[in-house]
Image (cartoon, helix red, strand yellow):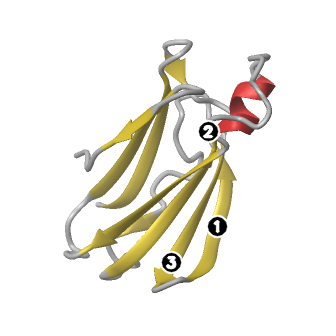
Amino acid sequence: MGLSTHVLDTMHGSPAAGMAVSLYTTAGEQAVLVKSFTLNQDGRNPDGLLYDNANLKTGTYRLVFDVSGYFKSRGVSLPEPNFLNKVSLDFGVADASAHYHVPLLVSPWSYSTYRGS
């Protein structure tokens, strides 16, 4: 299937619609922006997969989620500096023919992720 992501706002119990996300390819400390997008009403990329299997390559990637920007846009009063600003997830793709789903569950004070299906 390829590469996908999904973000759930655990503070409000809803998808993180409107959150800004950026996808990068990485090589060591170097990161190259692939695309930036805003999550749809379901907390997903509005264009579907970030990569399909034909274009997903073995290697390392980074997803950056604008957590503080999202919660500020929801009217949440955050301290300055924010506890979480942008959450950056670095992950590897070892089998480009497999599906890699990278969900994020997030509040202004915590997050968790895992390799989903």
Depth check, mark 1 against mark 3: the one in front is 3
Residue 117 location in percent, x, y? 22, 46
Q: Quadrant of the N terminus?
A: bottom left
Q: Amino acid at mark 1?
A: Lys
Q: CA distance from mark 2 to mark 3?
A: 23 Å
> Mark 2 near mark 1, Cβ–Cβ under 8 Å?
no
What residue did someone put label 2 on? 84
Q: Quadrant of residue 56 in the image? A: bottom left
Label at residue 7: none
Residue drawn at x 36%, y 65% as measured from the top left = 91
Residue 105 location in percent, x, y? 43, 32
Residue drawn at x 71%, y 33% as measured from the top left = 70
Q: Amino acid at mark 2?
A: Leu
Sequence-wise, which precedes: disc 2 or disc 3? 3
How many numbered marks, from 0 up?
3
In the depicted structure, whether residue 24 falls above or below residue 43? below
Depth check, mark 2 against mark 3: the one in front is 2
Q: Which SS class for mark 3?
A: strand
Q: Tag 1: Cα neighbours inside 10 Å, few (<14), some, or many (≥20)?
A: few
Residue 75 location in percent, x, y? 79, 16
What residue did someone put label 1 on? 35
Residue drawn at x 44%, y 35% as measured from the top left = 111
Q: CA distance from mark 2 to mark 1?
A: 22 Å
Sequence-wise, which precedes: disc 1 or disc 3? 3
In the depicted structure, whether residue 26 falls above or below residue 11? below
> Mark 2 near mark 3, Cβ–Cβ under 8 Å?
no
Sequence-wise, which precedes: disc 2 or disc 1? 1
Q: Amino acid at mark 3?
A: Thr
What residue did someone put label 3 on? 25
Q: Which SS class for mark 2?
A: loop
Report the side of 48 relative to 40 (left or right): left
Report the side of 57 relative to 47 (left or right): left
